[in-house]
Amino acid sequence: MDYREKLLELFNKAYLLKSVDLNLNNQVKQSVEIIAQKAISQKAVYTVFVTLAIYKLLNPKQDIRYHQSHMPNGFSGRTIDTKYITPTLKELGLPSMNESGWLTRSLEQPFPFTLDFQGKIRNTKVKEAFLYLIDTIQKNPKITKNIMLYLLYLLIEEKKKNEVKIIKLSNPDKLQISEIIDMLSKHFFYNYHTSNGAKLPVIAFYAIYKSLLTDMKRYKNCKLKDLGFHTTCDATSKSSGDIEIYSDKSILKETLEIKFEKEIDCNIVRVAREKIIKYNPTRYYILSTKPIKSEDKEIIDKIVKDLRIKHGCQLIINGVIPSLKYYLRLISSLEFFMSTYSQLIEADNELKPIHKEKWNEIISQYNNE
């Protein structure tokens, strides 16, 4: 049995659990609960923990605190994570990194995960819970299975809470662009009083590009990079922006960076310039729901011009809504776009139930008109 199969086996067992009486003491349970509660905001810690626990189950004699191959009697946790754990977490619809938890600076440090580990995991409670659980598993390997079952049970229950079935449009073939823009605006700009609403415009443009890749010759044989977690910074995810389009030769073609309720200032544009130089796309879009900061316009225009002359990349700055109107005129099927947007909203694990329920409310209003 490999690491993927072991994780799938535990997931299936956790999914069928009727009770969580797994003979775990209170400190262990509370530590697992902390990791589960922070599985999105501290994805790297949670992913590394899952990797080490699964590794321990299949290699009980390995001291999992020595998580790098150059450590005494160590092994490469990052390799196991990248090849097996992160792809399986994605497959299961659970929180996951883009590539590996070990790409996070605080966890990739060349020190064992002992109780005195000095890595700067920013949440003290998460750090303490993580190191305590690693120490517990190392000293008592037989408890590993039940710890993993409890963690997966908690993640599955949270996933179930987040599941909202998106209703279907009754007459999608009769949709007008103006109606779609109205529906999307209501969805984007509603005051949710919670986080992650800024991802909604990103999902809309991702759905747009799903259509463009089929409809436009410019994007023939191109592919979209999977949509990542919006809360992960670009430096951590090693991406040039929110949405990336690659040619059939895996060369970065276009990048979209979407700013929600942020004025475009010279700072944002300078960061984009650094990414353009590093990742080398031919086009880079900065789209925002707010306009360019008036006092920065002259500097921004100069940066845009210099990039075009010295680098060759077209840096295009525009509004979210005007860009959506433009792209909706280009695609051949508004019905396909709306269906794709709904599917992405329904499947997204980062959005809260209220984001999905609001979309259902908007669709219901349209269906009743």
Image (tube, helix red, strand yellow):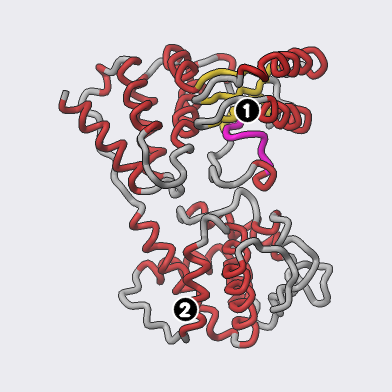
Percent of width and height locating residue 324:
45, 19
Mark 2–mark 1 distance (CA, rounded to whole Å): 43 Å
Q: Residues within 10 Å of mark 2 (few under 14, many from 20)?
A: some
* Residue 20, numbered circle: none
Element assignment for label 1: strand
Circle nearer the N terminus (2, 1):
2
Residue type for callout 1: Thr
Residue at the front extreme, as displayed = 295
- Residue plotted at (56% across, 18% down): 318
Q: Which residue is mark 2?
A: 29
Q: Which residue is mark 1?
A: 255
Percent of width and height locating residue 328:
42, 17
Left-right relation of 34 to 247? left
Left-right relation of 118 to 175? right
* In contact (CB < 8 Å): disc 2 and disc 1: no
Q: Quadrant of residue 14?
A: bottom left
Element assignment for label 2: helix
Q: Residues within 10 Å of mark 1 (few under 14, many from 20)?
A: many
Q: Is residue 289 above or below residue 349?
A: above
- What stretch of residues is rendered in magenta? 238-247
